[in-house]
Image (cartoon, rainbow, N blue to C red):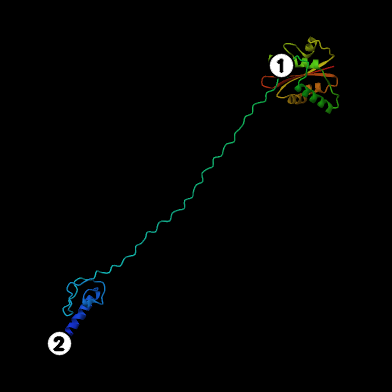
Amino acid sequence: MKHTCILLTAALLFTLTITGALAACPVGCDLCTELKGCNACDFCTAATATAKPCTILCPPTVTAKPVLLATPAPQRPQIATPRPIATQKPTVQITSKPSVPPVSNGDYTTFSVSKQEEIVFELLNRDRAKNGLPALVLDKELCRIARIKSQDMKDNRYFAHESPTYGRAAQMLSRFGYAYNGVGENIAHHSTVEKAQAAFLSSPAHRANIMGKQWQKVGIGVVYDDQGFVYVTQLFVR
């Protein structure tokens, strides 16, 4: 009886020892039923008394280390550069210089008065009226002679009161059989008849002819040169 108690006491102590030794061992043996983790022990038997410690220890618990996720570097916002808008260049239209029709189709001996000659005549009498002077009469034959003088200057490329062909104004009138008691002459070569008349007024000698109280009739001849400028001749008579 005494031996039996000793054996039981020893068995209990052995069991406690195994249990303490297997505190880290999972289940498998009869003596390890309270433990978890092991699948089996090498020397576990059905007899509790012959149970031996497990030779297969539980694998150490692996604690997963936290995986540090790389934080992507902040990206700078991409600012879209606006593309330059192509602007269409304005189209420049070049207008040609208006052609000037010749007077009387090139027949400068005609008795008709051209439109440009009428303009000069109106400007001349308007300037006289501003100065309290009576209007002059437009003489068609005198216009024909004045037109011949303008044509002569264009053809012979000169600009003077004395023509290499007809001489001075008095000689020219006599040559064409025009009766007169006195004559005065204005000549101009300008871009327009309006500017020619303005140039006459700015010259004291030419202005004196326009404002002459002694004159009764006037003849005006306008001829265009090859560049569209005008030769203007004014013949004043009494």
- Residue at horizontal 22 percent and vertical 78 percent from the top: 19
Q: Is residue 83 above or below residue 101?
A: below
In-image side of 164 versus 139 (left or right): left
Residue 160 visible at all: no
List the residue tagged with mark 2: 4
Q: Please provide percent x and percent y for residue 94.
A: 62, 29
List the residue tagged with mark 1: 106
Of labels 1 and 2, the one closer to you: 2
Give, as a three-letter code, the residue at label 1.
Gly
Q: Please provide percent x and percent y for residue 236.
A: 81, 18
Location of the C terminus (image quadrant): top right
Give, as a three-letter code, the residue at label 2.
Thr
Observer-nearest residue: 238 or 11?
11
Q: Are marks 1 and 2 in contact (CB under 8 Å)?
A: no
Observer-nearest residue: 139 or 32?
32
Secondary structure at numbered mark 1:
helix
Q: Please provide percent x and percent y for residue 51.
A: 17, 77
Q: Quadrant of residue 91?
A: top right
